[in-house]
Amino acid sequence: MDYKLFFWIVVTSIFSTIPLPLIKTYTKEKIKNELYVFISIVFNIFLIYLYIIVFNNESITIVYAIIKVLSILLTLVVDITLFKTVFTSSKIVGLILAVVSVILLSYE
């Protein structure tokens, strides 16, 4: 897998992750701010375009798995930093396994 494709995979993972804390914030607010939903919709529209870019260049099973694992890692980081989620030992093990899976899937 070349570096250009991996760059687009990382960008796709970021665009996949950004709407999640926005939606979580929207659901927790007493007065709903529809701007969170609108921004999430915009990111998901761009996400479709990014999927077209990355799936055009590589096997969908490998690329999609890497995107999802990177999204999970980013979601974990966002959840810990923004929402003060506790970092347990099982999350550490899951994080290590996720990193190993991305490394293994990246090599041909």
Image: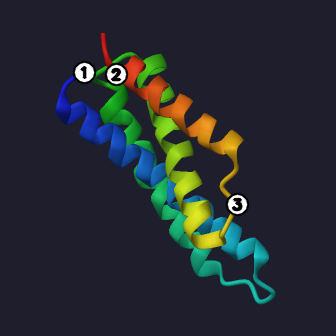
Q: Tell me: residue 96, above or below residue 75.
A: above
Left or right of residue 88: residue 80: left
Amino acid type for the residue under numbered disc 2: Ser
Left or right of residue 85: residue 54: left
Residues packed near mark 2 inside 10 Å, few (<14), some (14 to 19) or many (20 plus): some
Pointer 2: what residue? 106
Q: CA distance from mark 2 to mark 1?
A: 6 Å
Residues packed near mark 1 inside 10 Å, few (<14), some (14 to 19) or many (20 plus): few
Left or right of residue 104: residue 7: left
What x and y, as percent, mark residue 22?
60, 69
Asked if the residue at tag 1 contacts the one at tag 2, i.e. Cβ–Cβ closer than 8 Å, the answer is: yes
Q: Which residue is located at x 30 percent, y 35 percent? A: 53
Residue 43 vs residue 20, the one in the foreground: 20
The C terminus: image quadrant: top left
The N terminus: image quadrant: top left
Q: Earlier in the sequence, mark 2 or mark 1?
A: 1
What number is the disc on residue 108? none
What x and y, as percent, mark residue 104?
40, 18
Residue 23 vs residue 104, the one in the foreground: 104
Q: CA distance from mark 1 to mark 3?
A: 35 Å
What number is the disc on residue 1? 1
Q: Which residue is farthest top?
A: 108
What number is the disc on residue 86? 3
Q: Earlier in the sequence, mark 1 or mark 3?
A: 1
Left or right of residue 24: residue 101: left
Amino acid type for the residue under numbered disc 3: Val
Residues packed near mark 3 inside 10 Å, few (<14), some (14 to 19) or many (20 plus): few
